[in-house]
Amino acid sequence: QKEVEQDPGPLSVPEGAIVSLNCTYSNSAFQYFMWYRQYSRKGPELLMYTYSSGNKEDGRFTAQVDKSSKYISLFIRDSQPSDSATYLCAMGASYGKLTFGQGTILTVHP
Amino acid sequence: DGGITQSPKYLFRKEGQNVTLSCEQNLNHDAMYWYRQDPGQGLRLIYYSQIVNDFQKGDIAEGYSVSREKKESFPLTVTSAQKNPTAFYLCASRDRQGPLYEQYFGPGTRLTVT
């Protein structure tokens, strides 16, 4: 069983839809939770990060962590075609090492 | 401009040949990482280095080697022992004193071995 599981999709939604991306994990030691966005043939860029259970909002993006269920989510409101990318969840426990999910391919069509 | 550069962007090699991928950063970061990305598998850690002249194996180090002779450089050699070398390779760096989430990625090198 992988430490981090992420549904690879692909996910296709119309412009303006609310998108929900999710990851589950098995390692209780994970303390840091990140979401990266990766456009085609580019390196990932950090979108959001959280340390603890609860919600964190940044514009159209909301990151949610539920440590009791070992479940994290990223919500995108009013999705735009420019949001089309691969979204990777990542988690960290020990110093300097991150564990990534498989990535979800998202397409937002006009 | 500060950042991470990886070269070349695309690399083609014949099976049985070793190949070295370049990664350079001018962010003055101590820690550097190499990841491999395959379709549907996310990023998997190959090697990482916290300081110069020191590095550790990641989850999939077999068939790879690295060196860290300079702070700004962390080259990765894909040897002929690596069974499935065709992949997208990503280099990253981080300030060792900074938060874990502040890991910056380069643009990647797509390696194709035939």
Image: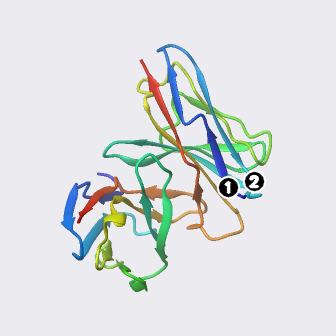
Q: Which residue is mark 2?
A: B26
Instruction: Depth check: give the residue in front, B62 or A76.
Output: A76
**Mark 1, residues whose alpha carbon is within 10 Å: few (<14), some, or many (≥20)?**
some
Q: Secondary structure at mark 2?
A: loop
Q: Which mark is residue A24?
A: none
Q: Is residue B23 visible?
A: yes
Q: Is residue B82 above or below residue B30?
A: above
Q: Position of residue B63 (x, y in %)?
A: 52, 27
**Mark 2, residues whose alpha carbon is within 10 Å: few (<14), some, or many (≥20)?**
some
A86 relative position to A50: left or right? left
- Locate the C terminus of chain B by quadrant: top left
Q: Residue at x 73, y 44 (%)?
A: B54
User: Sequence-wise, which precedes: disc 1 or disc 2?
Assistant: 1
Q: Position of residue B98 (x, y in %)?
A: 68, 69
Name which residue type carries label 2.
Asn
Q: Which residue is mark 1?
A: B3
Q: Is residue A32 visible?
A: no
Q: Chain of mark 1?
A: B
A90 relative position to B1: left or right? left
Instruction: Depth check: give the residue in front, A27 or B9.
Output: B9
Furthest-front residue in this view: A110
Q: Chain of mark 2?
A: B
- Locate the N terminus of chain B by quadrant: bottom right
B5 relative position to A10: left or right? right
